[in-house]
Amino acid sequence: MNDGTGLEQASQMVAAATAEITAAATPAALEDVRVKYLGRRGRLTLAMRELGVLDPETRRQAGATLNAAKEAITAALAEAAERLGRAALEQRLAAERADVTLPVDYGGGGRIHPISQTIDEIVAIFGEMGFVVAEGPHIEEDFYNFTALNIPPEHPARQEHDTFYLPERPDGTRRLLRTHTSPVQIRTMLAQQPPIRIIVPGRTFRADHDATHSPMFHQVEGLVIDRSTHMGHLKGCLIEFCRTFFAVDDLPVRFRPSYFPFTEPSAEVDIGCSRAAGRLEIGAGGDWLEILGSGMVHPKVLQNCGIDPTQYQGFAFGMGIERVAMLKYGTPDLRTFYESDLRWLRYYGFLPLDIPSLVRGPLVGVGAA
Ligand code: PHE
C-alpha cells in the first residue's frame, strides 16, 4: 500500500475487476472473476486481511476504501450475472421458436386406424344425443355375459356364441372372454339408478375365424332406461344414427322382427343399399344390409339388475364395428384390420387431426390417401 490508505491499489483493483467482468462471456467465467477478487484467497480479501498491521487511523481509511471497492466489484458482478441471464434466455427463445402459423406437416407420421376412427364417429353421434361412454372388462363372469341377460345354463343361445372359456376354478366355475358388449348393460344397471343412457364401444371375442369373422372383433352397445322409454324412441334413435353415420339423409332403415333372449320385442335393423353392376352402394336401391340388433330390454333382465319393470323400461342395441366400418369406408377384407400392414394403414387410415365431430358437418372422414 504505497500511499498508506490503499486508495490507489483499490481503484486499480476495481478497474481491473470491472474490465474482466465486462469480458466474462459465461456464468463460469464470471465466477472465476469473483473468486479471483472476492474469494477466500482473492486479491481484495487478502488486502483486507493486511489491514490488521496498520495503525488505527490508516486502517480506518484503508478499510473504508477497500469496503467501497468490494461493494463496487460485488455490484458489477451482480449486474453482469443479470446481463448473462437475460442473454441466455433470449438465446433460448430464439432457438426454440415455433411458427404456429405453419401448416401441419404429417410427413411419414402415424395414421388413425379405421376401427378407432369409426368408434370415435359412433361416440360423436350418440354423444350429441346425450349418451355417455361406459366400459367393462374383456374377461367376464358367466353371470354378466349370459345368466343375467336371461341366457341361463343350457340355453341354446350359449352354443351360438362360440365362447372362449378360461380354465375352471376350484369351485367349478369358468370365466370367459366376453362374447358381446351386452354384459356392460348389466354392470351399468347394477351400479346406477335410471335414467341410464350409455354407449359401450369395445372388444369382443368368439371362436370363429374366416374372411368375415375374426376371433377378436369390436362391438358397440347402447342402453337407454327411463320411465317412459318406448319402441318409438328406439326406432327414432337408430334411424337418426344410421343416416348420420353413413351421411345419407334419406337412407332407408328397416326394422325386422327377430329374437334375442335379453330383449322383447327384438328387431334387427337393415339399411338400404344397391348392388347394381356388382358395386355395393349405401342408400335407396331396393336391397338391404343388416347392420345391428336391438330391442326393448326384457323385464327379466331389469329384474336381474334390481330395476322394477313396472316403473322402468328401455331399449338396447348392439352393432359390429368392423362391419359398419367396412361398409362405410369400402375395406374389402375384415382380416386386413388386424394385420398391422403400414401400407394398408397409410391408405385406409385417417389423419390425426381428422377428429369426428358433428359440429364440423357430415361425418365423412377424408382418409389419408
Ligand atoms: N348382443 C347382441 C349380439 O351380440 C346384440 C344386441 C345387443 C341385440 C343389444 C339386442 C340388444 O348379437
Image (cartoon, rainbow, N blue to C red):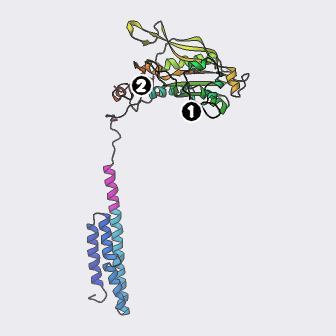
Please give the range of residues in magenta. 84-103
Sequence order check, earlier mark of 1 and 2? 1
Residue 151 x %, y %: 64, 21
Q: Determine the secondary structure under disc 2.
A: helix
Main secondary-structure element of the magenta-colored stretch:
helix
Between 236 and 169, the one lying in front of the other is: 169
Residue at 63% from the left image edge and 16% from the top image edge: 231
Q: What's the amino acid at mark 1?
A: Pro
Q: Which mark is residue 355?
A: none
Residue 350 x %, y %: 39, 28
Between 39 and 69, the one lying in front of the other is: 39
Residue at 32% from the left image edge and 38% from the top image edge: 102
Residue to which mark 2 is pinned: 337
- 105 up-or-down from 260: above or below: below
Q: Is residue 314 left or right of residue 334?
A: right
> Residues under labels 1 and 2: Cα distance?
22 Å
- 152 up-or-down from 41: above or below: above
- Residue 197 shows in the view: no
Q: Residues within 10 Å of mark 2 (few under 14, many from 20)?
A: some
Q: Residues within 10 Å of mark 1 (few under 14, many from 20)?
A: some
Q: Are marks 1 and 2 in contact (CB under 8 Å)?
A: no
Q: Is residue 361 magenta?
A: no
Q: Determine the secondary structure under disc 1.
A: loop
Q: Does the Cβ of the disc 1 residue fall within 8 Å of ligand 1? A: no
Residue to which mark 1 is pinned: 137
- Residue 92 shows in the view: yes
Q: What's the amino acid at mark 2?
A: Phe
Residue 19 x %, y %: 26, 71
